[in-house]
Amino acid sequence: GESVGLHLPTLSVQEGDNSIINCAYSNSASDYFIWYKQESGKGPQFIIDIRSNMDKRQGQRVTVLLNKTVKHLSLQIAATQPGDSAVYFCAEIDTGGFKTIFGAGTRLFVKA
Amino acid sequence: AAGVIQSPRHLIKEKRETATLKCYPIPRHDTVYWYQQGPGQDPQFLISFYEKMQSDKGSIPDRFSAQQFSDYHSELNMSSLELGDSALYFCASRMGRLYSGNTIYFGEGSWLTVV
């Protein structure tokens, strides 16, 4: 079936460095993607989203890149901070807008 | 700002018992989603409602049912509980259809432990 997945299960970075978290999706018909951050025991927190008619979107310290040709999504975090340590999920929203498919999360460790 | 409210936050039930989880979406949000997240797993979509009607269905067991009420809050009913139902259950909400670009906001989840 359709799926969204991540290439790396864990990522360890030094504080102040940039982080890149990758995600592959398989449903080329999906038109909306979201990155979520989840801290232990808490609900997923919205970080940034992107529609399929865009290839880049920037937020505060975060950038999402979408490559529809290879069905690849990435989240870039600039100047990573200890507070960024969490599990990051990419999510694919179906064209109807009612189902969110999450990929396997990537745990980000930020070393001080 | 108001967020998605879920209750109870923690629930312990025995096998074969019934549990009900409640979700109160952000005001003016008319779409509710339910997800199940097992330990160390990614959230799995269960079911969604739009304007009090079921809009999509995912991997929700037949033992589970859900509905959205006139005030847009939603309840997830789980019967004949099994040990494998122990998980964190998230509710999420959004306003309007996806095409408007409104994003999906999650509650803090309800921890269900089946013993």
Image (cartoon, coloured by chain):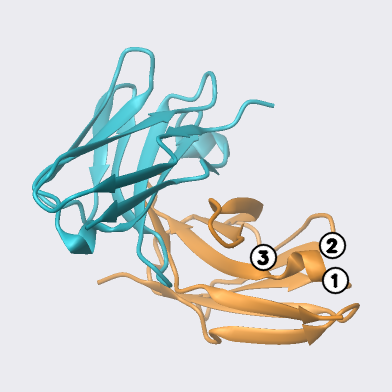
Chain colours: A orange, B cyan
Of all chains, the one bearing label 3 is A
The amino acid at mark 1 is Ala
From the image, tell me which residue sits under label 2: A61
Query: Whole-Å distance between the Cαs marked 2 and 1?
Result: 5 Å
Q: Secondary structure beneath disc 2?
A: loop
Q: Secondary structure beneath disc 3?
A: loop
The residue depicted at 17 percent of the width and 50 percent of the height is: B14
Mark found first going from the N terminus, 2 or 1: 2
The amino acid at mark 3 is Asp
**Crowd rating for badge 3 (residues with CA inside 10 Å; few <14, some 14–19, many 20+):** few
Query: Could you tell me if the residues under marks 2 and 1 are in contact, i.e. CB atoms within 8 Å?
Result: yes
Q: Nearer the viewer, mark 3 or mark 1?
A: 1
Q: Nearer the viewer, mark 3 or mark 2?
A: 2
Mark found first going from the N terminus, 3 or 2: 3
Picture coordinates of residue A31 (x, y %)? 48, 55
State the residue in front, B15 or A57.
Answer: B15
The lab-note entry on whether marks 3 and 2 share a chain reads yes
Mark found first going from the N terminus, 3 or 1: 3
From the image, tell me which residue sits under label 1: A78
Name the image quarter holding residue B45.
bottom left
The residue depicted at 19 percent of the width and 51 percent of the height is: B60
From the image, tell me which residue sits under label 3: A55
Query: Whole-Å distance between the Cαs marked 3 and 2?
Result: 17 Å
Picture coordinates of residue B40 (x, y %)? 43, 72
State the residue in front, A44 or A93.
Answer: A44
The amino acid at mark 2 is Arg
Number of marks present in the image shown: 3
Name the image quarter holding residue B19.
top left
The answer to whether residue B108 is seen in the rendering is: yes
The lab-note entry on whether marks 2 and 1 share a chain reads yes
